Amino acid sequence: MSPLRDREASLDHAQDVDLDVLVVGGGITGVGVALDAVTRGYRVALVERDDLASGTSSKSSKLVHGGVRYLANADLAMVAEGVRERDRMRRNAPHLVRPLGFVLPVDTVADQVKIKAGMSLYDVLSAGRAVRPHAHLDAAEVQAVAPGLVRGAGRGGYRYYDSQTDDARLTLAIAQAARVHGADIVTHAEVVALRDMGGRVTGATVRDRLTGAEFEVTARWVVSATGVWAGDLWGMAAGGADLEVVPAKGTHVTLPRHLVPVERAVVVPSGQDDGRMNFVIPWGEQTYIGTTDDPYDGAMGADALEDADAAYLLGSVNLAFGLSLTTADCIGAWSGLRPLLRGKAAGASTKDLSRKHTVIEQPAGLVAITGGKLTTWRQMAEDVVDHLAEADGNRAPCLTPELSLGATGTAEAGVARTRAAFAAAGADVAGAGSLYHRHGDDAPALIADFADRGEAEVLVPGLPYLVGEVRHAVEHEFARSLDDVLQRRLRVSLRDAAAGGDAIGRAATIMGGVLGWDADQQAAEVDAYLGNVRRERGPVAIRA
Ligand code: FAD
């Protein structure tokens, strides 16, 4: 089935059947709800206004973690939940959720005592599931993994483990699993109105943003997983919850790895008197730094790196490593919004609610899930579907704790299988690990297919992505725009100073061949992509 027909078929199906659950929003929360609901026997469709993960779910720090810093607030239940989910994901998606060592430098005896206690507690909360327990590193050992660190490690540091992921591809993997189990997933389709019968929400009007057509969807439940846009859905319903989403903006910048050649993620102080810490995180041949955390009052989705954000992040790394980096050294940047929730009348502090998730049914039939973390998507989805199942008397068990998200066995075995397939296809085996970590068990068959079609070479020099992945993204990964491919299926825009350079036009031509774009449409796609990257990068220029 061609990708266009696949989308049309899903659109038709969503209109033709009476759904049990219509999920609004294709971030990690929405796709998680779709997966949990469909595997408990519900008829499910998900509509996403833009692309999967185009909201906050592609803009995170890309960590799957318990959150060591929440220990400072003694929020042990939340840390334990994060650690439990991290370990489930390492089993269910070993290709996408990979162990990452962290180093927390220490300078004073008092810090050492405090951090040692926190590290021990983190191990306890991991209940023996930690990759490795924490360990003290002396100053030389810290230098070995964080070369050039000049501040804050007078007494060495502590090493501990969490996990790193590709947030957009994790969201995609969950959406693909939901589709395999029978959910209709339709991107570039927006809920523009809610249907109401006798005070209960019973469906929605959906606009297909590729054609402009509108259609009605009937559903017993509408789940709003719309992140910072939750207020829009409440605004569409008579009697929607009297809550508002107060976003907080977080930014990151990317540098070539050789400028800050860390072997582990390093936790460094912000250098300001706000007491915050930043992460300096290795990512292949790049290193990224994040994150800021500031109130945001601009238009939702129009957030971008600003001069002050760049100065804050670069100031932090410059101080810790004795460098003089400027935005001219940066090769990428991104910005995302955390959805914090506040009662409209109360004006109460959002600090506490912000990191926890909340399920609210108001009015009847409209169930909203807000807050939480990338890490806790599965638990959030379980809580939503438990809410529906309890009302429905549905006793089907939640299957997601053990459900594979595209890779079985260990990552080591998966990489070995993929290397063998690369060798058999005559492709450069150096790319095998990376392809496996994006595509899991599909990677060996993909490289054989790419090699057959002459698409096994690298798309952008210096990045691991292969030419065949562009076509594959359209045919099998819901991608519809050049932006979908170069920003989220492949993270070209975040990792290349030129945002892809010559490969941008090549990718547009490949996509045009599948989707029937003429030369004007291809040029418009290139302009739209570059416009988005330029806006999001702010002071970080696109340059060859
Ligand atoms: P979103 O991803 O924003 O998805 C909402 C979706 O709804 C959007 O795609 C939007 O287009 C769609 N939508 C809205 N309105 C409509 C409509 N009317 N019709 C159809 N679709 C609609 N968590 C971690 O665990 N680890 C981290 O390292 C981490 N780092 C972070 C760093 C930053 C800077 C930020 C901001 C957050 C971070 N988080 C992290 C938190 C995590 O990223 C978010 O909790 C998570 O991505 C939120 O996902 P979501 O699906 O709820 O929202």
Image (cartoon, rainbow, N blue to C red):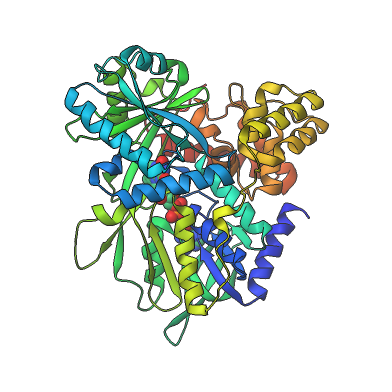
Estimate the x, y position of residue 470 in percent, counting from the top left.
67, 38
Q: Residue at x 27, y 31 (%)?
A: 116
Most foreground residue, 330 or 77: 77
Q: Quadrant of residue 21?
A: bottom right
Task: Say which of 96 and 124 sits in front.
Answer: 124
Q: Is residue 269 left or right of residue 203?
A: left
Name which quarter of the figure residue 232 lies in. Answer: bottom left
Give the percent coordinates (x, y) of residue 313.
31, 29
Say above or below: 501 vs 97: above
Q: Nearer the viewer, residue 327 or 271?
A: 271
Whether residue 136 can be seen here: yes
Place of residue 172 in the rendered image (x, y in percent of width and height, measured from the top left):
58, 48
Residue 325 horizontal/vertical position (percent): 34, 18
Number of disc labels: 0
Query: What residue is drawn where x is 63% and y is 54%?
Result: 177
In terms of image quadrants, where is residue 20? bottom right
Q: Is residue 78 left or right of residue 434?
A: left
Q: At x 44% / y 73%, what residue is drawn? A: 366
Question: Is residue 301 among what the camera can see?
Answer: no
Task: Pick the quarter of the image with the N terminus.
Answer: bottom right
